[in-house]
Amino acid sequence: MQQSGYTHTIDGRGESSDASFDVINPGTGAPFAVCPDASQDQLDRAVEAARRAFTAWRETTPAHRRERLRSFAQALKARSKEIATLLTREQGKPFARAQDELNRAFANLEGLLAIELKPELLRDNERGHVELQYHPLGVVGAITPWNVPVLLALPKITQSLYTGNTIVLKPSPYTPLTTLLIGEIAREHFPPGVVNVVAGGNDLGAWMTGHPGIDKISFTGSVATGKRVMASAASTLKRVTLELGGNDAAIVLDDIDVKALAPRLFWACFGNSGQICMAIKRLYVHEKVYDALCDALVEIANKVKVGEGFEEGVLMGPVQNRMQYERVLELIDDTRRQNARILCGGEALARPGYFIAPTIVADIAEGTRLVDEEPFGPVLPVIRFSDVDDAVRRANDSRFGLSGSVWSADPARAREIAQRLEVGTAWINHHVGVEYDVPFGGTKESGIGREYGAQGLKHYTEIRAVSVPVLPPMPPMVQPAGAAKR
Ligand code: NAD
């Protein structure tokens, strides 16, 4: 096993912990490194350091913060091969996809820094002058999951710091190492306490959400945990942004070019082995193109090489952890008991690691676990429809509302349908992807608040109205009783 040199970043210094836990490579199922497990005292010191650092950091100009974040990005880029290698080891994704994740994270970081949050003039007239200003909140507690750890950690650092906050960041215990490495690199680029990274289990997350020294929680993870985060944050009325799970529907109309769109649809379902919050998880297909599209998707699935992230030609990696692997297999088993047809896959690969063959299920509908729950793995239900209004109703009949899409040769028709989807992002002939200038987040139980874009940055601030009213003259003062006698 690789020995651990990984450390938390607390007040600008590296620290280990008395306790530790193993980090497992999902491509082998075996531990490959040891991660320090932060104590409550270490969290307290990270929060204190972040509070101290906030006093000076909040006074710096956006231009200064932009310049610091850019030099940090340069340092990350210089070590991107090392970070991507570690990402493949701990997360499992193919090395080329790990490099993509980093490149997208860098592009989002750069793009966010191009957005300026300027004060907004609300009034400048005979009633006076009123301006809306955006002020930092204080200490942000950021909590991330295991599917795209770098792509989620970097924007949280960027949005927090750029708006003048300091941060305490906690990665998932399944994928903590890339985030610890990012923290280590950050030590060189920011004053002590501005960026703190602590690794640990779910308890550490719960300590953060209840911590009186943290002002806002930026959480990305499951709906169930998001509800716990919100309840816990209520004790100190923390601001919360919750980026939670999805069960995204894509609606494929009867006029699509099946051959041309099948690869796009396939990767919007199976990218990152289906472990993307806004992956297509319910594919509604018009009956006219249903069989042809199922055949085309199966043809792609049968050609995709599934394997360990450094193997030659690998396009799809393992499921990231044993718990998720067992859950996906259980959902497939449950599907087998329905009257559904498993067109391909349907089982684990006979090798070490958490590999499941891409699984496509036809003749399935709502009322089954595979359709109603978020699978978060390489298994896709393809659902038949004949009436578009019915498909929209069924797509919307979900407690989730992250994103959705409509696929058609007629963009105007697709757009009319897409804007009826009850989601945070609706795409046309596309699905999956965050862009730095487009606010991203969910409706319903898929979340609260937005990240990215000017709206996303505003969620890292408190608004303050500064008002200089033009007041009518005061009426003449009434002399207090008895004043004249003195
Ligand atoms: P999870 O909710 O189990 O864990 C996420 C993080 O929360 C981890 O760091 C974990 O340690 C921490 N945590 C666990 N219990 C906690 C508690 N009580 N208080 C505070 N923190 C706690 O999620 P996961 O299994 O790691 O990730 C998969 C989920 O994340 C999926 O549902 C997926 O859709 C969602 N996700 C959403 C987005 C988005 O932007 N909407 C992006 C990626 C993933």
Image (spheres, rainbow, N blue to C red):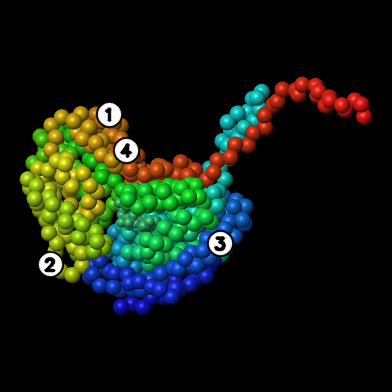
Marked residue nearer the N-terminal end (2 or 1) = 2
Residue drawn 27% across and 69% down?
A: 25
Marked residue nearer the N-terminal end (3 or 4) = 3
* Marks 2/4: CA–CA distance: 39 Å
Above or below, comparing residue 395 to residue 23 in the picture: above
* Marks 2/1: CA–CA distance: 46 Å
Return the residue at label 3.
Answer: 48
Residue drawn 46% across and 41% down?
A: 455
Q: Nearer the viewer, mark 1 or mark 4?
A: 4
* Marks 3/2: CA–CA distance: 49 Å
Cβ of disc 3 within 8 Å of ligand 1? no
- The disc placed on residue 423 is 4
Dots 3, 4 in contact, CB < 8 A:
no
User: Hey, what amino acid is under mark 2?
Assistant: Ala
- The disc placed on residue 416 is 1
Question: Residue 304's quadrant in the figure?
Answer: bottom left
Marked residue nearer the N-terminal end (3 or 1) = 3
**Few, some or many residues within 10 Å of mark 2 (<14, 14–19, 20+):** few
* Marks 3/4: CA–CA distance: 38 Å
**Few, some or many residues within 10 Å of mark 3 (<14, 14–19, 20+):** some
Q: Nearer the viewer, mark 2 or mark 1?
A: 2
Dots 3, 2 in contact, CB < 8 A:
no
Marked residue nearer the N-terminal end (3 or 2) = 3
Dots 2, 1 in contact, CB < 8 A:
no
Quarter of the figure with the N terminus: bottom left
User: Hey, what amino acid is under mark 1?
Assistant: Glu
